[in-house]
Image: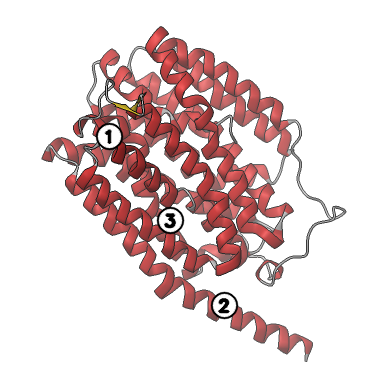
Amino acid sequence: MMAVSSPQYVWALFVPVIKQALGVSLAELQVTIAIFSVCMCGLGPIHGYIAQRISRSWFVGIGGALAGGGWVLSSFVTTLPPLYFTYGVMSGVGVGMVYVAGSDLAAQWFPDRRGFAVGMVAGSYGFGAVVTTFPIAMAIKLSGYHHALLVYGLLLGGICMLAALGMRERTGGDAVPAATADSTAASYSPRQMLATPAYWLLFVMMTLVATGGLMVISQMAVFARSFGIGPNVLVLGVAALPLALTLDRAANGVTRPLFGWISDHIGRENTMALAFTMEGGSILLLMLVGHQPALFVVLSAIVFLGWGEIFSLFPATQADMFGPKDQATNLGFLLTSIAVASVFGGPLASLVFEQTGSWTWVFVIVSALDLTAAALALLVLKPMRRAQRIRRAANQLALSG
C-alpha cells in the first residue's frame, strides 16, 4: 500500500512540468488523473471479483507490476494519448488492484476493530507518499520528470511485488478476534447490497467528501501559485509547496487509523460528522487566508486530515452493514464513488477555475458538499443503521424462539 500510493499523491508535482513539456492545457492534462481514478476505483467491482478468485499474492504482485510499469512507460511518452494509457490506465488499474486487496484483508482479519484495522492499512497508502514527496520533487528538479518516473517506477513497483509475497486470505482454520454484533450479521451478495438504499446513501456521501480531497490532491500545485505560493516561498526555511505536500501525506496517513479507532468507540456516523465538518471549514479558511504561506501549509494538512478518513470509515461501515463474505467485491462497488468524484475534483474543477479566473467557487462548492455529507451522516445514516440493528435483533429473537 505504501509502494503504490505515489502515482496518485505526487501527481501534483508532475503537473506543471508535464504541462509545459507537452504544451497542453491544464484541463487536458488533468484528464490523466481522472482516467487514473476511474481505473483505480471505477473498476473496483472487477478488481474485487477477481481478487476473491485467485491467490492474493499473485493478484497484488500483478497490481504492483502494472502500477510501477505505468510510471516507467510514462517516462518515454511525448504526447497526451500515450500518457493517458500509461499513467492513467496502467497505473490506475495496478493501484486499484492493490488497494482493494489490502483493504479487504484488513476487514477479514480484524472484525472486532475493523475501523482501526482498515484505517491502518489505508493509512499506509497515505504515508507512502510522505517518504517519496521530497525525493521525487528533488529528482524532477535535478534530472527532469522523465528520469523521476523511470527510477521511481522501477523502485516502487519492485517493492510492491516483493511485499505481495507475504499476503494471504484468512481461512476457516485461522484464529481471529471475536467479531462485533454488526460483523456477525448475514452477508449480502453484491446484487443484494446494490438493491438497498443504505448502499446508495454511502455511495453518495463518499462521492461528496471525496470530491474535495481529490480537488486538493490534483490541483494543489496550481492553486498554490494562484495564492502566491511559488517555488521560492519558504516556511521555516523549507520550500512551502513540498512541505505542504509532505505534511498533507502525513495527515492523510494519520487520519485513517485515527478516525477508524475513534469510530470503533463513538460510532461511525458521529465520527463522519466530526471529520466532514472539519474538512468543510478548513477548505473555506484555506480559500480566505491561503495566501499566507504558513497558514497554507497548516490548513492544507487539516483538509487532508478531514477527508482521508473516508478510506477507513466507509469500508468499515460497509462491512458492518453488509457482512464479510463478499466484502472485496462489495468494496469495489463502493470505491466507484471515487471515480465519480474525480470528475469534479480534477478536470471540471480546472474548467471552473479557467472560466472564472478564481478558485472561490470551487472551494465554496466543495465545502458545501462536505457539510452536506456531515448532515447526512447524522440525520439519515445513523437512523438507518439503528433501524437495521433493531431488525436484526428481532430476527435473531424470532429464530431463537
Number of disc labels = 3
Q: Which residue is situated farthest in the left direction here?
A: 356
Q: Mark on residue 206?
A: 3
Residue 391 sits in quarter = bottom right
Is residue 44 visible from the viewing direction of this image? yes
Q: Amino acid at mark 2?
A: Gln
User: In the depicted view, which residue is nearer to us: 50 or 183?
Assistant: 183
* Mark 3 → mark 2, Cα distance in angstroms: 20 Å
Residue 199 lies, in percent from the top left, at 49, 64
Q: Mark on residue 388?
A: 2
Which residue shows up at 32% across the image and 43% down it? Answer: 345
Which residue shows up at 28% across the image and 55% down it? Answer: 367
Q: What colour scheme governs how the chains and residues are painted in the rendered image of this protein?
A: secondary structure
User: In the depicted view, which residue is nearer to us: 264 or 56?
Assistant: 264
Q: Which residue is situated farthest in the bottom direction here?
A: 401
Q: Which residue is situated farthest in the top direction here?
A: 143
Which quadrant is home to the N terminus? top right
Residue 138 lies, in percent from the top left, at 43, 16
Asked whether, in this view, residue 95 is left or right of residue 360, the answer is right
Point out the tag, 1 or 2, that comes first from the N-terminus. 1
Q: Is residue 144 above or below residue 250?
A: above
Which residue shows up at 31% across the image and 17% down it? Answer: 17
Q: Amino acid at mark 1?
A: Pro
Secondary element at tag 3:
helix
Q: Is residue 94 above or below residue 193?
A: above
